[in-house]
């Protein structure tokens, strides 16, 4: 993939922005870092029939609670 110069911004009459246009900027390809697949766990399996569970993460305790409307709230 080659580099292509960007097109300058359109000039507005009476505007001196052309000297600030991006005509000298080139596009550089960005390398993406491969990510491991995201694990999907259902809320039903986390809650196991309860409305609230505690999750220990790196020494801190969090609460995952299901509201009466079925929404999830995670608090520390």
Image (spheres, rainbow, N blue to C red):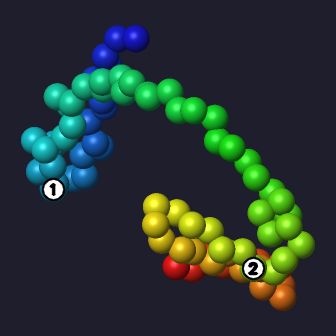
Residue 9 vs 75, above or below: the answer is above
List x then y, in percent, for residue 4.
Answer: 32, 19
Tell me: 48 left or right of 29: right
Q: Residue furthest top?
A: 1
The residue under the point 36% across, 27% down is 30
The quarter of the rendered structure image containing the N terminus is top left
Task: Looking at the image, tell me whether mark 2 or mark 1 is earlier in sequence order.
Answer: 1
The residue under the point 72% across, 74% down is 53
Residue on which the image places disc 2? 52
Residue 44 vs 74, above or below: the answer is above
Residue 73, quarter of the rendered image: bottom right
Q: Characterize the local packing of mark 1: few (<14), some (14-19) or many (20 or more) Cα atoms within 10 angstroms.
A: few
Considering depth in this image, is 48 or 8 the residue closer to the camera? 48
Residue 16 vs 21, above or below: the answer is below
The residue under the point 46% across, 66% down is 59
Q: Residue furthest front?
A: 59
Residue 62, quarter of the rendered image: bottom right
The residue under the point 89% across, 72% down is 49
List x then y, in percent, for residue 25.
Answer: 21, 30
Tell me: 7 left or right of 52: left
Residue on which the image places disc 1? 14
Q: Characterize the local packing of mark 2: few (<14), some (14-19) or many (20 or more) Cα atoms within 10 angstroms.
A: some
List x then y, in percent, for residue 5.
Answer: 28, 23
């Amino acid at each position: 993939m080659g580099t292509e110069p960007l097109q300058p911004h359109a000039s507005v009459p009476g505007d001196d922005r052309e000297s600030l246009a991006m005509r000298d900027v080139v596009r550089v390809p960005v390398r993406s870092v491969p990510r491991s697949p995201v694990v999907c766990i259902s809320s039903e399996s986390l809650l196991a029939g309860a409305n609230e569970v505690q999750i220990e993460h790196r020494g801190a305790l969090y609460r995952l609670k299901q509201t009466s409307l079925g929404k999830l709230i995670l608090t520390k």
